Amino acid sequence: MSDRRGGAGRAAGQAPAKVKKARRPQVRLPPLEPWEGRGLEPDGDYDGVEFRGVDLAGQEGIGARFMDCALTGCALDEAGLARARFIDSVLRDVRGVGTNLAEATLRDVEVVDARLGGVQLHGAALERVVIRGGKIDYLNLRKARLKDVVFDGCVLVEPDFGGARLERVEFAGCALKGADFSAATLTDVDLRGAAELGIARGVDRLGGAVISPAQLMDLAGVFAAELGVRVE
C-alpha cells in the first residue's frame, strides 16, 4: 500500500520556487562633452553629451535619442520627451512636474535621486533600469512594459501600473504608497523588500508577485475587501 503521507511530506518539503532576480544595468559612461545647445530638438540625436544644471523646462525633444548621456541637476518641468530613447545613460538629481515620457524607451539607465511629479511614462518600455533614491509622485506607467527594473530606496506616491506588464521587477527598501495594479500582469515581481507596501487597487492582480508574511498581514484587510469578506 502506498504511503500517501510520505508523498505529501515530500511535496511539503520541496523548496519554494525562487523569484528570478532583475538584471541591473551596467552603465559605464565615456568621457562626455558638455552640452552647449540652446534647446532640445524633436528627433534630436545626443551622443556622449553631459547636460549639467540645464533648464530643460518646456523643451520639446519628442522622439530624441540620448546615447551615453548624463543629465545632472536638470529641470524637466513640462518637458516634451514622448517617444524619446535613453540608452546607456544616467539621470541624476533631475527634478520637474509634468514631464512627458509617454511611449519612451529606457534601456540600461540609472535614475538617481530624482524629484518628479506627474511623470507620464504610459506605454513606455523600461529594460534594465534602476530608480534609486528620490521621490516620484503620481508616476503614470499605465500599459508600460517593465523588464529587469529595480526600484531601490525611493518613494513612490500613488504610482499607476494599470494594464502594465512587469517581469523581473524588484522593490528594494522603497515606499510604495497607494499603488494601482489594476489589469496589470506580474511575473517574478519581488515586493518583499519594500519598506512600505500600500496597494489601493488591483490586489487581485498580484499573482506572479512575492510578498513577505508580514506584508501579507498588513494587506489582510485589502484581500478581505477584494473577496467581499467582512471582518468584525
Image (cartoon, rainbow, N blue to C red):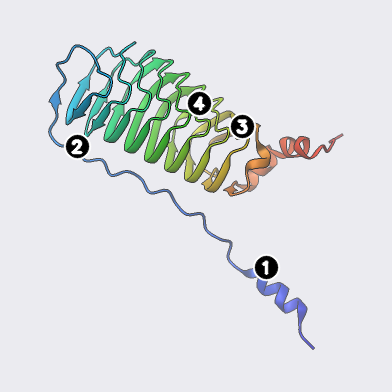
Q: In this view, does 178 lie above or below 118?
A: below
Q: Is residue 41 left or right of residue 186?
A: left
The numbered mark, 3 or 1, whose residue comes first in the sequence reads 1
Q: Is residue 183 above or below residue 139?
A: below
User: Residue 230 appears in which quarter of the rendering?
Assistant: top right
Q: Name the residue under label 1.
A: 12
| SS for dot 4 | loop
Q: Is residue 173 left or right of residue 70?
A: right
Q: How crowded is mark 3: few (under 14 residues within 10 Å), some or many (20 or more)?
A: some
Quadrant into which the C terminus falls: top right
| SS for dot 1 | helix
Q: For the view shown, which residue lies furthest in the bottom direction? A: 1
* Residue closer to the observer: 65 or 28: 65
Q: How crowded is mark 1: few (under 14 residues within 10 Å), some or many (20 or more)?
A: few
* Identity, as a three-letter code, of the amino acid under mark 1: Ala
The numbered mark, 1 or 2, whose residue comes first in the sequence reads 1
Q: Mark 2 points at which residue?
A: 29
Q: Mark 3 points at which residue?
A: 198
Residue at (26% x, 23% y) in the render: 72
Q: How far apart are marks 1 and 2 (CA)?
A: 49 Å
The numbered mark, 4 or 1, whose residue comes first in the sequence reads 1
